[in-house]
Image (tube, rainbow, N blue to C red):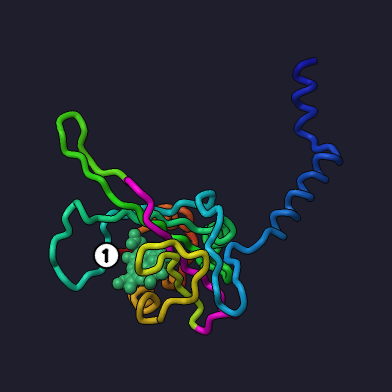
Amino acid sequence: MKTHRISCKLFPTPLSLAAVLFLGSTAASEKPPAVFEGKDTLLRPEGYRQWVFVGSALGLEYSPNEEKQTSSNLEYKNVYIDPAAFKAFSETGRFPDGTMFVLETASAETKNEPGLQGSFQKEYLGISAAVKDTGRFPEGWAYFRFTDRSGTARTQATPAPKAACFDCHRQKGAIDNVFTQFYPVLRAASLGVAQPEAKRARP
Ligand code: HEC
């Protein structure tokens, strides 16, 4: 009798099929991750910590000066991608229009004492974002900082000048302006998918 009940669950009832169809259609009509006001003012993203976390780096930067960073001024950077773009990238190796990344910075604290060594993230400092929207931005990608010079959080941001962000991303990001060379989660997700836009496999 028990076996019979279990095997029955393998066959979807019309009701459960309807539920699946309904859920599918809600997912498709979800709001895009990037919410703009007017032409190009991006509102501060909400809920990005529930997106896909693609990697974290400590004190990583392309810097012309070779001065050694000290552990006291290092920052962590945590990078998230919106779930729909993650799915599309896994399937096609490309970032679709509407892709949004959020980069969150945090201060680093280093412990080097008997019984506790290593580095951890201490305080969140701020966020920036990258959005691909070829209809809105002729270059495809635009970059936004949600912290002003005094360190205060902004609720909205306009695109940063091209030389401030875009140029480095274009030159050094491995796939379509994105630093996939530092994101093992994205590399693993797209394994086996052809990546025509990949410039290089390593930093
Ligand atoms: C000199 C090079 C350089 C410049 C200039 C630069 N970035 Fe980046 N950016 C990086 C690197 C390297 C990463 C990889 C993540 C990390 O640093 O941990 C990155 C990652 C990002 C990401 C995560 C998605 C991605 O494309 O990989 C965002 C969002 C981002 N940067 C925003 C900005 C914004 C906004 C600016 C301008 C205010 C900016 N960046 C300027 C080098 C740069």
- The residue furthest bottom is 138
Residue 70 lies left or right of residue 200; in this view the side is left
Between 166 and 202, the one lying in front of the other is: 166
Q: Is residue 196 magenta?
A: no
* Residue 94 location (% of width, % of height): 51, 67
Query: Judging from the image, what secondary structure is the residue with disc 1 in?
Result: loop
- The residue furthest top is 1
* Residue 11 location (% of width, % of height): 79, 35
* Residue 158 location (% of width, % of height): 49, 75
First to last magenta residue range: 121-138
Q: Quadrant of ligand 1?
A: bottom left
Quadrant containing the N terminus is top right
- The residue furthest left is 67
Residue located 49% across and 61% down the image? 193
At label 1, counting other C-alpha atoms closer than 10 Å, the crowd grade (few under 14, some 14-19, many 20 or more) is few
The residue singled out by tag 1 in the image is 61
Residue 111 image-quadrant placement: top left
Between 62 and 72, the one lying in front of the other is: 72
Q: Main secondary structure of the magenta part?
A: strand
Relative vertical location of residue 25 with respect to residue 132 in this rendering, above or below: above
Residue located 76% across and 26% down the image? 7
Quadrant containing the C terminus is bottom left
Residue 33 image-quadrant placement: bottom right
Relative vertical location of residue 80 with respect to residue 18 in this rendering, above or below: below
* Residue 177 location (% of width, % of height): 42, 72
Residue located 55% across and 53% down the image? 47
Beta carbon at label 1 within 8 Å of ligand 1: yes
Residue 136 image-quadrant placement: bottom right
